Amino acid sequence: MVKVYPEKHLNITRQNLEKILAEYGITSFEFEFFNKGIANTSVKITTQKGVFVLRIYRQERRTNTEIELEIKFQDFLRKNDLSIPVIYKNKDDQELTCINIEGKTWKVLLIEFKEG
């Protein structure tokens, strides 16, 4: 599927993923690019500890405040017994990770993988 504004998406390489996943203490992994979304980039990450989805927001797509509101809403739904994927915290105990790669700051979430 063609991405909207492909120049605003992170180049998915093992090196770039290693840098991002180091923020979550993940050093050994396999990855598979999901070619379904048009706005953000999603990558399936498989480790010995489990399977995750790494969501990388497109440049200039959402502000930190907008993403944090999305996270709070999902936390609210989860606390009220709706079965939605867990968003994992990084080494700084934050759900939203902002990381500089290739001279740009990328906004990233590490999410529990659920089939379906």
Image (cartoon, rainbow, N blue to C red):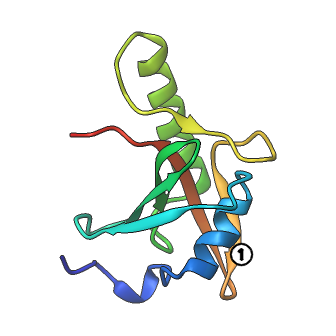
Q: How far across and how far down the image is residue 66, in percent?
A: 51, 48
Q: How far across and how far down the image is residue 48, in percent?
A: 57, 47
Circle 1 — which element? strand
Identify the residue at image location x=49%, y=64%: 30
Between 55 and 75, the one lying in front of the other is 55
Identify the residue at image location x=71%, y=47%: 90
Residue placed farthest to the right in the image? 92
Horizontal side, residue 90 vs residue 15: left or right: right
Q: How far across and how far down the image is residue 107, in percent?
A: 58, 62
Q: How far across and how far down the image is residue 80, in percent?
A: 42, 10
Relative to 48, say whether 108 is above or below.
below
Q: Few, some or many C-alpha atoms within 10 Å of disc 1 (few <14, some 14-19, many ≥20)? A: few
* Amino acid type, mark 1: Asn
Identify the residue at image location x=64%, y=61%: 28
Q: Name the residue under label 1.
A: 100
Residue placed farthest to the top in the image? 80
Residue placed farthest to the front in the image? 48
